[in-house]
Image (tube, grey):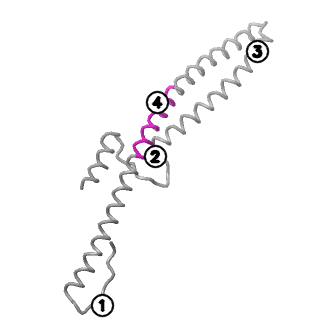
Amino acid sequence: MCLIRALDEVRRTSGYTDLEERSYPHRVTSRLIRLERERDNCLLEIAQLKAKIKNLEKRAESPEGKANLKNAQDDLAVLVSKFEGLEEMRREAAAQKRDFDLARIQYKQRTSIRDERKRMLDDIKAQIEKLKIMHDDPDTPDVEVQD
């Protein structure tokens, strides 16, 4: 029972209740991947808009050209702000992912210890059963008992 408490302790201290390995990504991992994809797309949009602004600057003599340049610069400011927000959320998600990964490692280690102890107990139980058989029926041929 002590090992079950150890597993519960990992869950409690980490704040994650679902630390078991599974075939699909955990929500923490999925969120980080999504934020990285959004950030990368935003960077691409920023690069494209910077190129557009560079072209507009060359042809900004007319009032319409100046208005287009101003709009593009405003759009760039919005995208840069969005990028900064996404980057901050991505950093937070990366920190949560590190915490989650550490909790999962602790959980896996403790699960491994629990499983090994279960195997040892099962082996001991089997040895006890063999000894009981030998004790209860002295005519039974010797049953090999492991050390």
Q: Nearer the viewer, residue 144 or 113?
A: 144
Mark 4 to mark 1 CA distance (whole Å): 67 Å
Q: Secondary structure at mark 4?
A: helix
The type of residue carrying mark 2 is His
Name which residue lies at 42% across and 46% down: 105
Q: Which residues are magenta?
A: 88-105
Q: Residues within 10 Å of mark 3 (few under 14, many from 20)?
A: some
Q: Nearer the viewer, residue 23 or 47?
A: 23
Q: Residues within 10 Å of mark 2 (few under 14, many from 20)?
A: some
Mark sitting earlier along the chain (2/4): 2
Vertical position of residue 105 compared to residue 64: above or below: below
Q: Nearer the viewer, residue 117 or 131?
A: 131
Main secondary structure type of the part rendered in magenta: helix
Q: Which residue is mark 2?
A: 26
Q: Which residue is mark 3?
A: 56
Mark sitting earlier along the chain (3/4): 3
Q: Where residue 12 appears, x then y in whole percent?
A: 30, 42
Mark 3 to mark 4 CA distance (whole Å): 37 Å
Q: Which residue is mark 4?
A: 92
Mark sitting earlier along the chain (4/1): 4
Disc 3 versus disc 4: nearer the observer: 4
Based on the displayed image, in which of its 4 quarters is residue 74 positioned? Answer: top right
Q: Secondary structure at mark 3?
A: helix
Disc 4 versus disc 1: nearer the observer: 1
Mark sitting earlier along the chain (2/1): 2
The type of residue carrying mark 1 is Pro
Q: Where residue 19 appears, x then y in whole percent?
A: 39, 48
Residue 70: mark: none
Residue found farthest to the left: 136
The quarter of the picture where the C terminus appears is bottom left
Q: Which residue is mark 1?
A: 141
